[in-house]
Amino acid sequence: MKVAIQREDFDLGAETRAISKNPKIGAVASFVGLVRDVRMSLEHYPGMTESALRKIVDEAASRWQVMDCTVIHRYGDLEPNDQIVMVAVASAHRGDAFQACEFIMDYLKTQAPFWKKEHRAGGATWVEARASDDEAADRWK
């Protein structure tokens, strides 16, 4: 299980191939989040953020048959259309892979210690948590 917080971009295809080598794997579900229409800066607490992501991945592995998983989240300054985050989950069956991938992403949005600042023409503002993200995570309780 790989958890990485990094400035540099990632290659979804390479990361997916890396977790797909076991012949018992029958499915890989993945998600990639992109920067929408506004430049942003992401900050995090090194160590704390990786630990939070590992807990989320471990929780997913305890609920579904996860054979391998990769979570990569970027930080620093990002432009529109840049990749921010990827989650890829390998399992014997698609249902486990889909559900674990969605669970990890929903919990990452609400429990991972990242701070996002959007840079618009009128100035920079911190992005507030969304009620819809909390609602998405609550459905897994």
Image (cartoon, rainbow, N blue to C red):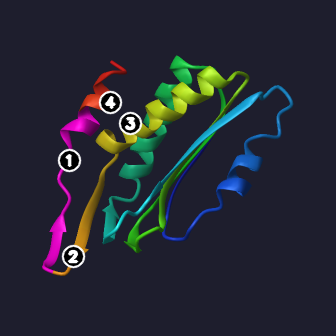
Range of the magenta residues? 122-134
Q: Which label's residue is closer to the chain start, 1 or 4? A: 1
What residue is shown with label 1? 129
Q: Nearer the viewer, residue 49 or 130?
A: 130
Given contact means CB atoms under 8 Å apart, are the residues at marks 2 and 4 in contact? no
Given contact means CB atoms under 8 Å apart, are the residues at marks 3 and 2 in contact? no
Given contact means CB atoms under 8 Å apart, are the residues at marks 1 and 2 in contact? no
Which residue lies most toward the front here?
37
Q: Residues within 10 Å of mark 3 (few under 14, many from 20)?
A: many
Give the amino acid type for the residue marked by disc 2 in the picture: Arg
* Above or below for 104 versus 37: above
Q: Which label's residue is closer to the chain start, 3 or 4? A: 3
What residue is shown with label 3? 106
Which residue lies most toward the right here?
23
Instruction: Give the distance between the C-alpha atoms of the residues marked 1 and 4, in whole angstroms.
Output: 12 Å
Q: Mark 3 against mark 2, which lies toward the viewer?
A: 2
* Above or below for 46 versus 110: below
The structure residue drawn at horizontal position 20% and vertical position 58%, both measured from the top left corner, is: 127
What residue is shown with label 2? 120
Give the amino acid type for the residue marked by disc 1 in the picture: Ala
Q: Is residue 128 magenta?
A: yes
Residue 137 numbered mark, or none: 4
The structure residue drawn at horizontal position 34% and vertical position 68%, both measured from the top left corner, is: 37
Q: Quadrant of the C terminus?
A: top left
Q: Which label's residue is closer to the chain start, 3 or 2? A: 3
